[in-house]
Image: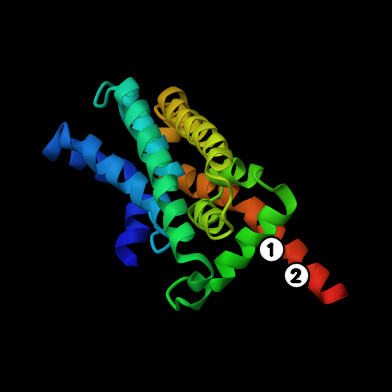
Amino acid sequence: MSFLIDLFLHLDTHMAAVIAQYGAWTYGLLFFIIFMETGFVVTPFLPGDSLIFAAGTFAAIGSINLWLLLILLMIAAIAGNTANYWIGYWLGDEAKNIKWIKQDYMDRTHAFFEKYGGKTIFLARFIPIIRTFAPFVAGIGKMPFDYFSMYNVTGCIVWVALFSFAGYFFGNIPFVRDHFSMVVIGIVVISLLPAVWEAWQARRKNVNA
């Protein structure tokens, strides 16, 4: 846990070390992390938004090729969501009996589906934890794959592009560079706000019921 916290808070330092040591293999590592973060319900703790933002900052100084980064991470996100969908589709209702799948996260994701329908697949890309469970729940619910894919591809492209370009254009501003840890925390907090709001509304409804 302490390693994950340190990874989040010092993404810029860790990424600089990885690029210096592994060079082009960095693309493979980034691809793997983004695929895992969205592709399996047991890995929602991996960095997503903040990692792509950090990668964008290194693209701005020429350490990473921006266009290659965009293409690879878009493919990773789309493929991860697709794998997660088919895992949920295959498990079906049996997923509710698997102890290592947090039911609380499942319930929050169900709440998003009840409110936003298929748009949840798109919106979830911007919400940590929910984005990991959304394709899984869509698979369990047997959402038509074509319908799922439409929101999946669109959401992944917008998500990767948004955070990559944000890091590219703003990540090396002196204030952001000097307070990178605070910026990363800010990204995580802002990303979590919609999920917190939905959880609070759901709890308020239960209390008033």
Q: Which residue is drawn at 67% across and 54% down?
A: 112
- Is label 1 in a helix, a strand or a loop? helix
Residue 103 in the image: above or below residue 31: below
Residue 73 in the image: above or below residue 168: below
Q: Which residue is drawn at 34% across and 60% down?
A: 4
Q: Identify the image quadrant of residue 119.
A: top right
**Amino acid type indicated by mark 2:** Arg
Q: Residue at x 45, y 25 (%)?
A: 165
Q: Picture coordinates of residue 24 (x, y %)?
A: 16, 31
- Asked whether 180 or 44 is in front, the reply is 44
- Asked whether 116 or 29 is in front, the reply is 116
Residue contact at pointers 2 and 1, CB within 8 angstroms:
yes
Which label number is shown at residue 199?
A: 1
- Asked whether 117 or 198 is in front, the reply is 117
Q: Picture coordinates of residue 150 (x, y %)?
A: 55, 34
**Amino acid type indicated by mark 1:** Ala
Image check: 102 left or right of 12?
right
Q: Identify the image quadrant of residue 203.
A: bottom right
Q: Picture coordinates of residue 161 (x, y %)?
A: 46, 28
Image check: 10 left or right of 171?
left
The answer to whether residue 197 is seen in the rendering is no
- Is label 2 in a helix, a strand or a loop? helix
Residue 104 in the image: above or below residue 68: below
Image check: 12 left or right of 174?
left
For the N terminus, the image quarter is bottom left
Q: Picture coordinates of residue 53 (x, y %)?
A: 42, 36
Q: How many labels does the image show?
A: 2
Image check: 149 left or right of 86?
right
Provide the residue designation for mark 2.
203
Give the class, few, some or many, for how many residues have Cα within 10 Å of label 1's Cα (few <14, many ≥20).
some
